[in-house]
Structures are given as C-alpha cells and as structure tokens.
Image: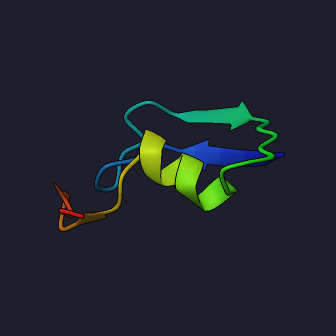
Amino acid sequence: MNVINFAVGSSDELGEITVEVTVVEPSVDDVIDHIAPPTEDGEPLQQ
C-alpha cells in the first residue's frame, strides 16, 4: 500500500489519499501511465 500526494507547487491541493491496487496484466507502470500520463513542466508528453 502506498500514499499518493496530489500536490502542485508547495501546497497540497487535494491532500493525501491511500490506495491499494493489484494489477496482473498489463504492468503496474502501464496502468499508472494510463491513469496519470507522464508530464514535463506540467504538460503531457506526447507518445
């Protein structure tokens, strides 16, 4: 189990939430990228 903090800048805008995710397939990294795509300087990276 991990704690995820959705913060932008120095203040915690949404606070902390605790999540538990079990992924068999696709990989955990693929699921995370689908839910929250990678960004650079706040802009989504085009894949």
Residue at point 64% right, 32% down? 17
Q: Answer with the quarter of the image where residue 23 lies.
A: top right
In the picture, measured across the screen, residue 10 lies left or right of residue 25, that is left
In the picture, measured across the screen, residue 16 lies left or right of residue 11, that is right
In the picture, measured across the screen, residue 12 lies left or right of residue 41, that is right
Q: How does the figure colour the protein chain or chains?
A: rainbow
Judge whether 24 appears above or below 28 on screen: above
Q: Nearer the viewer, residue 30 or 17?
A: 30
Q: Nearer the viewer, residue 43 or 45?
A: 45
Judge whether 40 appears above or below 31 on screen: below
User: Where residue 8 appears, x then y in whole percent?
Assistant: 31, 49
User: Where residue 22 appears, x then y in whole percent?
Assistant: 82, 40
User: Where residue 24 appears, x then y in whole percent?
Assistant: 81, 46
Q: Answer with the quarter of the image where residue 27 lies.
A: bottom right
In the picture, measured across the screen, residue 14 lies left or right of residue 46, that is right
Q: Nearer the viewer, residue 7 or 19?
A: 19
Q: Nearer the viewer, residue 20 or 28?
A: 28
Q: Quadrant of the C terminus?
A: bottom left
Q: Quadrant of the N terminus?
A: top right
User: Where residue 31 appears, x then y in whole percent?
Assistant: 57, 47
Judge whether 44 appears above or below 21 on screen: below
